[in-house]
Amino acid sequence: MWVLAVILIVALMIPVAAILVDSPLGRSVARRLEGQGGGGTGPTPELRDLQRKVELLETEIEDLTRSMSGMRDELQFVQRLLEDPHKKKPTT
C-alpha cells in the first residue's frame, strides 16, 4: 500500500516539477545557477556576446580605415592627373 502511495506521489510530482522549471521563476533560478557555475568571477553570457560583437566591430573599423586611406591616396592621384594632364607629358 505504501509503495503504491509513493509511486503515485512521484508520478504526480513529475508534471509539477516540469511546470515549475518552465516558469519564469524556474528560468531565473537556472540563470543564477548558470552564472555561479564558473565560480561567479567569469563574465556572463550576455557580456561575452557583447565583447565578441565589440571585437568584430573594431576589426571592421580597422578594415574600413585602411580602405578609406587607400581611396584617399587614389583620389589625390586622380585629382593631380585631372588638374593639368599636359604637365605630366614630357616635352620633346
Image: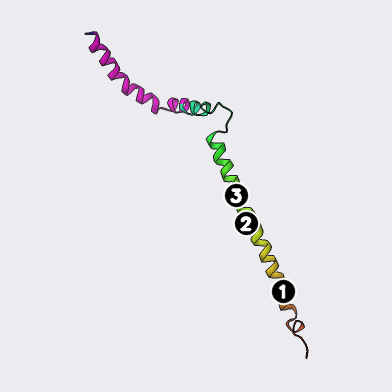
Q: Residues within 10 Å of mark 1 (few under 14, many from 20)?
A: few
Quadrant of residue 6 in the image?
A: top left
Q: Mark 3: which amino acid?
A: Leu
Q: Of circles 2 and 1, which is in front?
A: 2
Q: Residues within 10 Å of mark 2 (few under 14, many from 20)?
A: few
Residue 59 placement, left or right of 73: left
- Read off the magenta span: 2-29
The main secondary structure of the magenta stretch is helix
Residue 49 x/y as whole percent:
54, 40
Total labels drawn: 3
Residue 30 placement, left or right of 3: right
Q: Which residue is mark 3?
A: 57
Q: CA distance from mark 2 to mark 1?
A: 24 Å
User: From this viewpoint, which residue is outermost toward the top?
Assistant: 1
Q: Which residue is mark 1?
A: 79
Q: Which residue is mark 2?
A: 63
Which residue lies at the image location 56% right of the left edge and 27% below the top edge?
40
Nearest the camera: 38 or 31? 38
Q: Earlier in the sequence, mark 2 or mark 3?
A: 3
Which residue lies at the image location 66% right of the left edge and 57% below the top edge?
65
Q: Mark 1: which amino acid?
A: Gln
Q: Earlier in the sequence, mark 2 or mark 1?
A: 2
Which residue lies at the image location 36% right of the left edge and 22% below the top edge?
17
